[in-house]
Amino acid sequence: MPTIGFIGLGTMGAPMAANLLRKNYAVTVYNRTPGKAAELIGLGAKEAASPRKVAESSDVVVTIISNDSAVEEVFYGEEGILSGLKPGATVIDSSTISGDLARRLAASVAEKGASFLDAPVTGSKDGAIAGTLLFMVGGDQAVVEANRDVFLAMGREIVYMGASGSGATAKLCHNAIVGINAAGLIEGMAIAAKGGLNMESFLRVVQGGGAASKQADLKGVKVIGGDYSVQFSLALMLKDLKLGSVLSDGMSVPTPMLEVAKSLFQAGQAKGYGEEDLAALAKVYEEWIGKKI
């Protein structure tokens, strides 16, 4: 079995690394914010002092990091992955980043004689814990197949998207739909609440009718219960919508719904809800309608 390095032990990364350990992989971990590795160490992981040290000891390095600038630091920093990457190694980046950055990382990794796959995920925190994530992957298809067992230790499905950057682009398009869908759900629920409807009953109508969606299933109950514990944070949703906006602008694709959704999540961020679940957008609407949804 290949030795695994895992960098990024946040909401998604920690359970993904835990699943690799449960599949008996030898895993070395690193997180930019100290103190997040204790549970994984208890499962048998080793903790490294830097991304470089992770890369030096790993056949496969998996990264899942919050944004483009943090990814660049982890790869290109003085103690970054690229300073320790072994020839013949594979880097699997599951961060949600721009396609341009994914292609640049692929080129930089190739210069080290290694392979790079941009492989963001969907499935949220629950999927990361259960090992049921879907990976959308860009890069050399032969490298994807060579690492199939590593992927399937963390998820249920691998969808090959094409050349480097294709996985990253697919994730931004996917999350544009998620953000628009979530905003539409919450707006519809706000109208229903203002109209005096029973919200549990209304949600059953949504889930059983033409408005049914994954967001209705995941976020509807959270909104009604005022439960904004994080599955996927509002701040990360906003970050992804901003990246999607840049992507669409670069292709001259008009995206009026994406821009409206981005503005709504910006309002939530401005209210201080960024570190709560994206469903906390409902609190913005509750202020507007003057009552609880």
Image: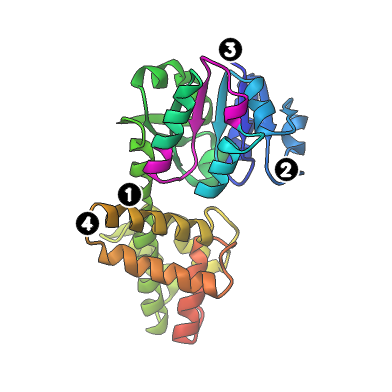
Q: Where is mark 2, residue-wise? A: 36
Query: Would you call the spot at circle 2 few (<14 residues within 10 Å), some (14-19), or many (20 or more)?
Result: some
Quadrant where the N terminus sits is top right
Using the numbered discs, state the Cα–Cα distance from disc 3 to disc 4 in whole angstroms: 45 Å
Q: Earlier in the sequence, mark 3 or mark 2?
A: 3
Find the distance from the CA under tag 2 to the CA under tag 1. Answer: 31 Å
* Label whose residue precedes the other's in the sequence (3 or 1): 3
Is the residue 137 above or below the residue 268 in the image? above
Mark sitting earlier along the chain (3/4): 3
In this figure, which residue is indicated by the disc labeled 3?
1
Upstream in sequence: badge 2 or badge 1: 2
Q: Residue furthest top?
A: 1
Look at the numbered disc 3 and give the secondary structure of its residue: loop
Identity of the amino acid at label 4? Ser
The CA span between labels 3 and 1 is 34 Å
- Residue at (28%, 65%) from the top-left corner? 257
Q: Secondary structure at mark 1?
A: helix
Q: CA distance from mark 2 to mark 4?
A: 41 Å
Q: Earlier in the sequence, mark 2 or mark 4?
A: 2
Give the number of the mark in front: 3 or 4.
4
Q: Quadrant of residue 47?
A: top right
**Residue receiving disc 4:** 252
Q: Are marks 1 and 4 in contact (CB under 8 Å)?
A: no
Magenta region: 81-102
